[in-house]
Each structure stands twice: as structure tokens, then as C-alpha cells.
Image (cartoon, grey):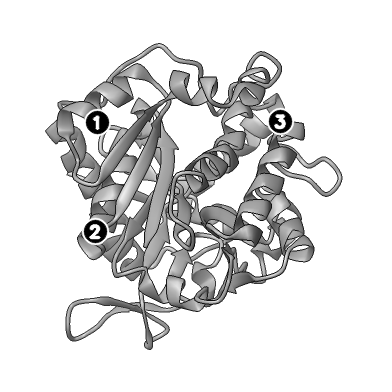
Amino acid sequence: MTLYCTYFDQRYLDRGLAMIRSLRAVDPEARVAVLCLTASCEEALVGLREPGVTLIGLADFERRNLDLLMLKSERTPRDYPFAFPSCLMVSLLSEVEPGEIVTYLDADLLFYSSPQPIFRAMDNGSVGLIGHRHHWWSKRLEKYGRTNVGWVSFRCDETGRAAAQWWRERCIEWCAAYLDGDRFAEQKYLDHMQQKFPRIVEIMHPGANIGPWNICRHSIARGATGTLSVDSSFPLIFVHFSGVREAGPNVWLCSNLSYLGPFSRTVRNELYRPYLRLLKSIRTELGGLPEEPTPDLRGSPPARRYRMRWLLRMAGWLAGHYVSVR
């Protein structure tokens, strides 16, 4: 048995719902704890009454993690949430039965088949991590972490609890969105964890955590049964739609260009377009995303980074790395 957890605010409500619903479509018994970062996000989820979903309010979460709350005025709105996954993990591990697994998921995932191959792979492990599996061009980005935070699993045993607690302590100690020696946000700590603790399993399944940083390494196709497969032999478990940005009404730019990832007809029509149509349908169901004046959790990038982001967007347009959804 596993308990999943995630966090998002009203701006990611459509993505979070898409992730949760796709997970429960392939694992109907899945239980998901959602840390709601804003009141409007929590109110919307209360109204939807999603099966298997438990809601955690941010104020309650901070009261139970006072050392985290003390950092709120010291850290930027972008950096503060980086400590949430580790704090969520430690908190939830104290509530589950021995031997159960707690798994953190990013909100921008979408599931296509059962995650059981991942849990089978960590059958004898206490921690399950999934690497970026960078292709040759994006390997330069390994300085930010070989391991991706999109999926992180901890078993409720001595090693799992100790590793989660160590991760939490490091994130409370320092956690920011820039390289500081051998540290970067909450992500780089996972690389060090593999060197520090036993019984850590790196999940190598090709269908787990397909993203713009590794899509060059894999071929994706729809088989005779209608299901998507990876490298002709493995079921596609989940895709990490990282870096997808709304560029205008019904138009989205994708981040594949940042990694020199391909944007083939299959990638566009079998992955991105159905995902973005799903987000659009959820927004229609909600009557639009709730509005709430909250700090931008992404923060304000430095001018140089802003210029690079603008150049990448322009390059994305020119390269055709955008999707129109009508």
C-alpha cells in the first residue's frame, strides 16, 4: 500500500486534478494527500469531493512544522515551497502503518498505466528515486541533480524514516533555486542521500518519468491495443510535463527546446495535445481557475535569466515547439 502526496495552488489546480485523476484511473485505490497552498485551491477541491483525496490546509501544515514557518519571512516566495515535499514526507510517514510507502508526486505529471512496476522495483528497498536519465545534450544539467523530484518514495521503516528526516533537515537548513556548491533546491540532496543511506533503489523503468530532459533517449509509440509504449517493450507509466507555459488563449509553449528534446508528431499529438486538452476541459468544469492575490511562488528571475527565458520562448515559437488547443 502507498499513500501519495503533492502540493499546488489555484494556478496549478487543473494540472493537479489531471495528475490525481489519471493516477486513480490506473490505480483506483490510490489515496492522495494534497497540501493546498491557497484558500481558493482548498475551497475548489472541497467542492469537487475527489474520491481518495485528503486535503491539508497550508496554515495547519505550518503550525505542525514551526521550524518551516520560521523560514517564511527569510526565504523568497519561490524558495519557501521547496521544503514542502520533505516536510510532507516526514509528517505522513508518522501516520501510515509500518512497511507502507509514502510517495511524493509533482503536480504536472500524467499517468498512463499502473505504477506497480515502480513499486516492484523497490520491493526490497526503503527509498525509491527516479533519475533524470539525461540525454547527451542535457547531461550538463546534472550539476542540478541526477535525481528528479517528480517522484520520490519512502517506506515506513527505519531507513526510510531516517532518510526522509535527513532530507527534511537539509531543506530546513538551506534550500534555494540556485547552485550553492553541491546543493540545489531540494533536488540535489537526493543525490547525496544515495551515498549516505542503504537500501535506496534507483528506478530504471524507461516508462517512468518521461520528460523533456530524456525524451531523446526513448521512442514512444501507440501499440495495436491502443496503449502507449516506450522503446517498443515497456508500458508508458507517466510523463512529466515540466515547463509547459501558457503563451496565449489556447496556445501553450513546451520546454523540450531547452533540452534539445524532439517535438515530433507523436510527441505533439499523443502526449502534449491530449494533456493540454485535458487541462482545458478541467478548466471548463471549474468555470475557470480560481483567482486569488497570492505571491508568485516562482519568484522574479534576475534580468539575465528573464532575457534567456524570452529568447527560449522566441526560439520555441520558431522551432514549432508550441501546441494549439481548440
Q: Which residue is mark 1?
A: 45
Q: Is residue 251 visible?
A: no
Q: Nearer the viewer, mark 1 or mark 2?
A: 2
Q: CA distance from mark 3 to mark 1?
A: 38 Å
- Are the residues flagged by discs 2 and 3 in contact, CB closer than 8 Å? no
The image shows residue 87 at horizontal and vertical percentages of 57, 37
Q: Earlier in the sequence, mark 2 or mark 3?
A: 2
Q: Residues within 10 Å of mark 2 (few under 14, many from 20)?
A: some
Residue sitting at 52 percent across and 39 percent down? Answer: 91
- Are the residues flagged by discs 1 and 2 in contact, CB closer than 8 Å? no
Quadrant occupied by the N terminus:
bottom left
Residue 166 drawn above or below residue 118:
above
- Residue 41 appears in which quarter of the rendering? top left
Q: CA distance from mark 2 to mark 3?
A: 46 Å
- Are the residues flagged by discs 3 and 1 in contact, CB closer than 8 Å? no
Residue 158 drawn above or below residue 51:
below
Residue 251 drawn above or below residue 161:
above
Q: Nearer the viewer, mark 2 or mark 3?
A: 2
Instruction: Indicate which disc residue 29 carries.
Output: 2
Q: Residues within 10 Å of mark 1 (few under 14, many from 20)?
A: some
At label 3, which amino acid type do we have?
Arg
The image shows residue 8 at horizontal and vertical percentages of 41, 34
Q: CA distance from mark 1 to mark 2?
A: 19 Å
At label 2, which amino acid type do we have?
Glu
Q: Is residue 118 visible?
A: yes
Between 13 and 254, the residue placed more toward the observer is: 13
SS for callout 2: loop
- Residue 60 appears in which quarter of the rendering? top left
Q: Which residue is mark 3?
A: 304
Q: Nearer the viewer, mark 3 or mark 1?
A: 1
